[in-house]
Image (tube, rainbow, N blue to C red):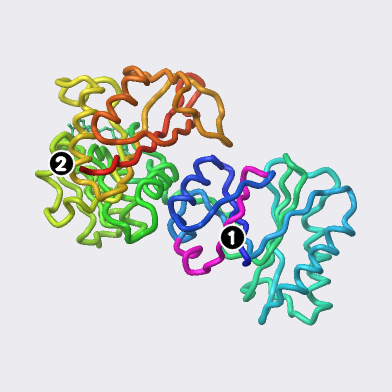
Amino acid sequence: MSGSLACFRGWHPALARAELAALLPQAMLTPTSCPRWVWVDTNNSDDNQQALDVASGLQAFLLDGKLHRWTGDEEPLLAAVSHYLHSHPVDGTVKVLAWRQEQRIPGVSTSVLSGEIGGIMAQRGWSVELESPDHVLALIADGPTSTLAFGWMQGQGPVPFEHRARQATQRPFFKPVSLDPKLARLVVNMAGGPRGSGPIVDPMTGTGGFVIEASLSGRPCLGLDINSEMVAGASANMAWAHDGDVPESSIVRRGDATNMEQALPTAWHGTVAGFVLDPPYGRNSHGTMGSMSLISKTLSSARRLCKPNGQFVLILPVEPMGERLDETVALDEHVRLVNGEWEGLLQTMVEQGWNPRTAWVERVHRSLSRLILLAECAPQD
Ligand SMILES: C[S@@+](CC[C@H](N)C(=O)[O-])C[C@H]1O[C@@H](n2cnc3c(N)ncnc32)[C@H](O)[C@@H]1O
């Protein structure tokens, strides 16, 4: 059976892998020598396209993609590409799109190789069309592993998720707490799985970072905040993101995270696919409840509303943990939360009916990291 090679953007490959695993739950993902590429054992182009349409960390799929370790000689590479083209014929016009990841592979010129592969394609009788070809052969050179990947590409390739118009600072209502859209989108996908799995709920939406991403990717969603100024601001941001035409199923309203039943549409009770929570640092905006107690009560409310196997993704500030772009954080590692105790948090989650599964860390700045913790709803009684 043919599969595909999923290719990630460089921002955080370990998170990108987790996002893809959530978006393609039926697929088996197998690591390769390069953290930014994984084998996917299926090649359903509709599923792949759905993942490409919404993912933050995914760059492209290469159909039955091949890896080639650079030996210092281009002949074996060109022979492998030629063999691939022979065994994967396509109809229509073609072009080669080459790019590199991180540093150069010494001795490799992707533009020279593209020209040579274009020549092989022309020899095979294909017409090369640079503007809008029917098929694009991707050639990616990964500097750190001196490996090249190639294959017919599905997706856009090396285009950043975020362009200027998508930056949180461009929205009408911006606060320093506003999440980076690429992280917000990734967390929404991790919590929600494939589109159509159910609503996404952000119990403490602030400026609306999560719900905007959920809504723009076609998911029903609810963002709550206890602070009316935040509700008005998040609503303005949501309207701005949709040019004033907000889908009915994208809801932002005032509500208390610890009692979401009151604010959640009745039809959504028991159907929520994922909760995404970025709680306030320290005490909440009312200053009435300690941060762990607020999280605990929010987990409890979420548990009453999620669907079986619903997911909960929690983002928390932690003491610096360095770059961990290719790996997860072991749950038994001692993580130093900025607010509260790690072991106590894990215990609270379990007590409230959520099984902590996996954690990742992202560097924010020299003196702060951010933990992303995924938990799954424990089997319901
Ligand atoms: C860190 S901010 C969220 C930032 C958000 N992720 C964004 O992109 O803007 C936390 C938010 O939680 C809200 N909050 C605090 N306690 C709450 C509660 N009990 N229920 C709902 N919202 C609450 C605060 O008003 C604040 O806007």
Q: Residue furthest front?
A: 381
Q: Position of residue 280 (x, y in %)?
A: 27, 28
Is 271 or 319 nearer to us in this picture? 271
Q: Circle 1 sits on which residue?
A: 61
Tell which circle, 2 or 1, labels the residue nearer the N-terminal end.
1
Q: Is residue 39 magenta?
A: yes
Q: Please state if 196 lies on the left or on the right of 303 as rendered.
A: right
Classify mark 1: helix, strand or loop.
strand
Is residue 119 depicted above or below 357 in this figure? below
Q: Please state if 24 lies on the left or on the right of 274 as rendered.
A: right
Q: Please state if 99 lies on the left or on the right of 358 as rendered.
A: right
Q: Range of the magenta residues?
A: 34-50
Q: Residues within 10 Å of mark 2 (few under 14, many from 20)?
A: many
Is residue 81 depicted above or below 225 in this figure? below
Amino acid marked by disc 2:
Met
Res. 286 visible in picture:
yes
Res. 163 visible in picture:
no
Q: Whereabouts is ligand 1, in terms of quadrant?
A: top left
Q: Give the distance between the C-alpha atoms of the residues marked 2 and 1, in whole angstroms.
A: 39 Å
* Residue at x 32%, y 61% (from the top left corner): 196
Does mark 2 have its CB less than 8 Å from ligand 1? no
Q: Circle 2 sits on which residue?
A: 260
Q: Report the quarter where the N terminus lies.
A: bottom right
Question: How many numbered circles does the render carry?
Answer: 2
Q: Report the quarter where the C terminus lies.
A: top left
* Residue at x 60%, y 58% (from the top left corner): 157
Q: Position of residue 129 (x, y in %)?
A: 69, 75
